[in-house]
Every structure is written in structure tokens, then in C-alpha cells.
Image: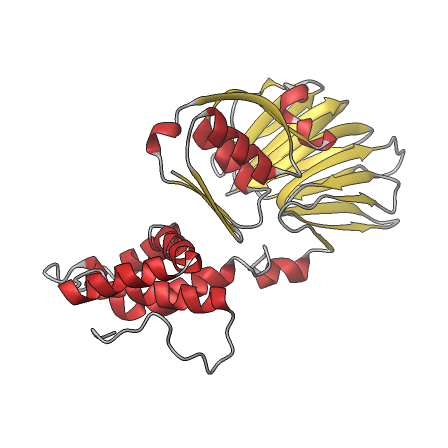
């Protein structure tokens, strides 16, 4: 971009006003790394020309400071130290940022092999009820992937990602064998939940008992009603008492927090919000949150949290910024 940048360039592509504003905002982020006095004046003129411009620029800044661009900058960190990271990233910034914007509107599942393996998928914010061939009932939570193979010779189910709640009836035949990342479960006449995210699985037993085996370690345990256990690549952690009213509140369509740090609350809300929730106020991270919320209204929860903490909230399509 040169000093002759115009606030309203021609639009031969037929892009929407929002798309045009975002395209210009991405350009301005590059220019403002080392702007001349004239470019600074032109930027302020562009910013004041339209509310769409101001919104687009704030959104572009959030993307620039987000994880996708930061990871790309690290990947480009092999050039000599005398060249700044921004300088290394500048030639790649526009396509990276544009791609980040586009990602907000794409499917929640970007892992094509996962999509091909699973029989059932839920997108972000969606829940789905299933009944398996043997009469077992499954409730899939947000952003989950699941499949099952049940016949006279086998009863096998796989949770590839996400969270599921199972009601397994009594069956004199084979037990249901459930695979979820680092754990294998053998189940009969049991009600339980499994959460598998970021390489860690958690099993929570509400009724009955489950025999568990760690996939990557020679460990086996039996988990009883009212117990919960986490398992990762190193094996099982010590079992803990299950607080079903809080930990399984999602089954009833609720999210329950008790003296939970705001950072953890926002991390959980991100699982249900089909976009980005960005916290630009580090002082809020450790604020304790107690509340009972509807999980199908994550944006309303963020609004409520912003209100009680006197934080400023900026809302855009698929993007919420807390300042």
C-alpha cells in the first residue's frame, strides 16, 4: 500500500461492505507497522469514515493477536535475528489473516479423516441424541465425533472427539467396549459420561460400575458410581469424587460453575460458541465465577460476565472481544 490509499476503493468483485472493510483493515495493519505522517492521517480518516471500518479494524487486530498468526510467526522464526518477526510475517500476513477470517465461517471439524471415520458428528453448540442397535442411548455434546459397530459378534463404540453421555441397559451378551483416546472401557448396565479433549480422557460414572484400561500403559481400574477419573498418555490419575450436579449439568442443558476462574469459564464457553471469544483483559483471568447458565446461549453468558466485571464487550459476527 502507498500514500495514495483511498478510503473507498473501487469494488469490481461485488464484495459486501463488511468484506471490503475487512480487506482494507488487513491492509492498514501492515501499513501501520511503520506509517508515515500522511499514512497515519489517511488511516484516521478511513477509520472515521464508517462504523464498519472501525469494527473491521478491531476484528483484524484481534486476529493479528490470536493464536493462528502467532503460530505462523513462530514457524517463520528461522530467518536471521536482525529481521523482526513482523517483517518475516508481513509477506504472509494478508493471506494468513484472510484465512483466519474465513475459518470463522467454516465447519467446526477441519479434520477430514475424523469426519470420514465418525458415523455421527455434532457441530459447535449442537447436541444429538442417539439410540444404538442394542438399545443403548447416547447423548453427544458439542463438537463431538462418534461411531459404533454392534451386531451378534461385537459391541464396539468409539468417541473420537468431544463428550458423550451413555445409558447402557442390562445385556446378557457381550459388554459394550468403548474406545476414547487413551482409555478403553468395558460396560454393562451402566450410566456414565466420557469427555475426550486434547489427548486427555475423563470418565464419570453416575450408575453402576465400569472396568477401564489405559491404552498406553499397563493399568486397569474399576470405577464405581459417584467416581470420576482422568487418563492421559501416562495412564490414570487418582480417582476423584464425582459432582454430578456440576460436572454433568450439560446433560440437562446447563453449565454450572462454582468459584471457577474466569479463564476456565471462557475456555468452556468457547466449546459452545461457533466463533472466537477473545479476552484482552488479563486481570479478568483469575476472577472467580459462580453461576448456573444455559449452554445453548454462550453469548448471553459472556455478556453477563462482562456486565458483572464492568468489562467492555465488542461483538462482531462470530467474534466477541472482552476488553
Choose between 154 and 97: the one closer to the eye: 97
Whether residue 221 is situated above or below residue 143 in the rendered picture: above
Colour theme: secondary structure
Quadrant location, the C terminus: top left
Residue 141 percent location from the top left of the image = 68, 41
Q: Quadrant of residue 253?
A: top right
Q: Quadrant of residue 180?
A: top right
Q: Is residue 299 left or right of residue 264?
A: right
Choose between 208 and 102: the one closer to the eye: 102
Residue 93 percent location from the top left of the image = 32, 65
Q: Is residue 156 left or right of residue 135?
A: left
Q: Residue at image x 66%, y 43%?
A: 179
Whether residue 107 is situated above or below residue 219 in the rendered picture: below
Quadrant location, the N terminus: bottom left
Residue 92 percent location from the top left of the image = 31, 68
Choose between 195 and 32: the one closer to the eye: 32
Q: Residue at image x 48%, y 64%?
A: 18
Amino acid at each position: 500500500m502507498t500514500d495514495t490509499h483511498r478510503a473507498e476503493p473501487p469494488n469490481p468483485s461485488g464484495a459486501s461492505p463488511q468484506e471490503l472493510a475487512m480487506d482494507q483493515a488487513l491492509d492498514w495493519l501492515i501499513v501501520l507497522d511503520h506509517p508515515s505522517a500522511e499514512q497515519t492521517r489517511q488511516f484516521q480518516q478511513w477509520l472515521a469514515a464508517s462504523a464498519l471500518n472501525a469494527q473491521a479494524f478491531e476484528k483484524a487486530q484481534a486476529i493479528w493477536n490470536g493464536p493462528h498468526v502467532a503460530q505462523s510467526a513462530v514457524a517463520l522464526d528461522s530467518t536471521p535475528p536482525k529481521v523482526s518477526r513482523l517483517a518475516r510475517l508481513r509477506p504472509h500476513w494478508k493471506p494468513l489473516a484472510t484465512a483466519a477470517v474465513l475459518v470463522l465461517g467454516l465447519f467446526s471439524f477441519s479434520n477430514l479423516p475424523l469426519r470420514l471415520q465418525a458415523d455421527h458428528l455434532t457441530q459447535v453448540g449442537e447436541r444429538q441424541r442417539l439410540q444404538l442397535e442394542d438399545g443403548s442411548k447416547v447423548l453427544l455434546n458439542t463438537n463431538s465425533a462418534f461411531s459404533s459397530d454392534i451386531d451378534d459378534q461385537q459391541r464396539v463404540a468409539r468417541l473420537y472427539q468431544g463428550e458423550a453421555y451413555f445409558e447402557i441397559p442390562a445385556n446378557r451378551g457381550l459388554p459394550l467396549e468403548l474406545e476414547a483416546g487413551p482409555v478403553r472401557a468395558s460396560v454393562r448396565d451402566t450410566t456414565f459420561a466420557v469427555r475426550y479433549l486434547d489427548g486427555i480422557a475423563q470418565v464419570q460414572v453416575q450408575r453402576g460400575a465400569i472396568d477401564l484400561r489405559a491404552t498406553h500403559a499397563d493399568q486397569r481400574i474399576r470405577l464405581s458410581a459417584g467416581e470420576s477419573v482422568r487418563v492421559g498418555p501416562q495412564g490414570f490419575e487418582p480417582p476423584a469424587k464425582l459432582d454430578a450436579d456440576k460436572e454433568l449439568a450439560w446433560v440437562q442443558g446447563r453449565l454450572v460453575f462454582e468459584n471457577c476462574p474466569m479463564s476456565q469459564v471462557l475456555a468452556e464457553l468457547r466449546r459452545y460458541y461457533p466463533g472466537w471469544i477473545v479476552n484482552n483483559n488479563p486481570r479478568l483471568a483469575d476472577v472467580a465465577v459462580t453461576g448456573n447458565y444455559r449452554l445453548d446461549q454462550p453469548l448471553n453468558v459472556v455478556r453477563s460476565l462482562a456486565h458483572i466485571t464492568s468489562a467492555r464487550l465488542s461483538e462482531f459476527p462470530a467474534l466477541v472481544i472482552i476488553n
